[in-house]
Image (tube, rainbow, N blue to C red):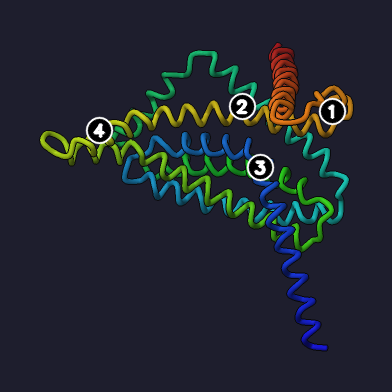
């Protein structure tokens, strides 16, 4: 009967959409570590260009990020269909990379930053003889390359949450996660890089005898913008240990065996700390191995 067939089709569509919604939510939670780092890193990379060119640069990087997702999502789906047993090893590799990158960021933060390189970048922006088109292209290309690596991690981690689902559900979920996270990240990046400009505009417009509230708001934005960047960097690093360590704990039985078995909020917090510690240890071992390899190679 046509009516019964239509109802069956609608029921199937509703079931797929329910599965997609649930899996998309789970995938978004699992990719939070990479998302935080992606947000902080891209906001830092696209900053430094002239104020009137910040939004065009962000838009150019956004288009590059979407192209990265267009390349990566089909590859991930093909892998899931033809070689599903490779997903767990790829998840472990992604988790190890997250832990390594987190430890490397902490290590570099403990050392004095390269002020000479930063000052050279500021001088290049101020120098009228510098080809700003080439400078912007270098910024955009560097940000897109970084995004490709982080996007690959996001897609692989998201793929791990939809393993066993139908190909249609996997396709819709990965597409929604990829599109949603891209728009979320670069929408926030655009807002972050313009915070100081908005604050400066408020201060200039309402200086002197202007609206005191708006002037104070402007000063607050000028003070808040660098603090926000610092917070995003720290939160992103912490999330990398949580997500990376969590992947390792679930992938290796001996690590999962030693995880505390405590119910409730206390157990959730303790398990998160345990995962973060495992991630920090794994990242430290990888960083030490990498340093030792470079030392031996350069002899």
* Disc on the earlier residue, 3 or 1: 3
In the picture as drawn, the residue positioned furthest to the bottom comes out as 1
- Observer-nearest of 73 and 115: 73
* Residue 180 makes an appearance in the image: yes
Local secondary structure at mark 4: helix
* Disc on the earlier residue, 4 or 1: 4
Q: Check whether the beta carbons of the residues at disc 2 and disc 1 lie within 8 A of each other.
A: no
* Disc on the earlier residue, 4 or 2: 4
* Residue 99 makes an appearance in the image: no
**Label 1 environment density (alpha carbons within 10 Å; few <14, some 14–19, many ≥20):** some
**Which quadrant does the C terminus fall into?**
top right
- Residue at point 84% right, 53% down? 164
Name the mark on residue 256: 1
**Label 4 environment density (alpha carbons within 10 Å; few <14, some 14–19, many ≥20):** some
Local secondary structure at mark 1: helix
Local secondary structure at mark 2: helix
Name the mark on residue 216: 4
Between marks 3 and 1, how big is the CA–CA gap?
20 Å
Between marks 4 and 1, how big is the CA–CA gap?
51 Å
* Left or right: 13 as drawn, with respect to 150: right
**Label 2 environment density (alpha carbons within 10 Å; few <14, some 14–19, many ≥20):** many
Q: Check whether the beta carbons of the residues at disc 4 and disc 2 lie within 8 A of each other.
A: no
Residue to which mark 2 is pinned? 238
Residue to which mark 3 is pinned? 29
């Amino acid at each position: 009967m046509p009516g019964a067939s239509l109802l069956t089709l609608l029921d199937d569509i509703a079931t797929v959409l329910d599965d997609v919604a649930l899996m998309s939510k789970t995938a978004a939670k699992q990719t939070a570590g990479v998302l935080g780092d992606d947000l902080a890193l891209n906001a830092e990379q696209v900053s430094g260009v002239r104020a009137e060119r910040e939004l065009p640069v962000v838009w150019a990087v956004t288009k590059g990020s979407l192209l990265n997702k267009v390349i990566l999502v089909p590859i991930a789906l093909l892998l899931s269909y033809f070689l599903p047993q490779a997903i767990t090893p790829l998840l472990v590799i992604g988790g190890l990379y997250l832990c390594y990158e987190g430890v490397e960021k902490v290590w570099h933060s403990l050392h004095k930053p390269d002020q000479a390189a930063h000052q050279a970048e500021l001088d290049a922006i101020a120098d009228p003889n510098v080809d700003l088109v080439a400078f912007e292209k270098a910024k955009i290309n560097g940000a897109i390359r970084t995004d490709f690596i982080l996007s690959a991690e996001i897609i692989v981690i998201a793929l791990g949450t939809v393993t066993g689902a139908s190909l249609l559900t996997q396709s819709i979920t990965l597409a929604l996660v990829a599109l949603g996270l891209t728009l979320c990240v670069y929408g926030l990046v655009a807002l972050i890089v313009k915070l100081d400009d908005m604050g400066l505009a408020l201060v200039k417009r309402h200086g002197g005898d202007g609206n005191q509230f708006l002037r104070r708001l402007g000063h607050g934005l000028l003070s808040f913008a660098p603090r926000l960047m610092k917070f995003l960097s720290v939160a992103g690093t912490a999330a990398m240990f949580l997500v990376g360590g969590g992947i390792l704990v679930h992938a290796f039985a001996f690590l999962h065996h030693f995880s505390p078995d405590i119910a409730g909020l206390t157990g959730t917090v303790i398990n998160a700390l345990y995962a973060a510690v495992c991630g920090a240890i794994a990242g430290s071992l990888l960083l030490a191995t990498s340093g030792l390899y470079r030392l031996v190679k350069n002899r």
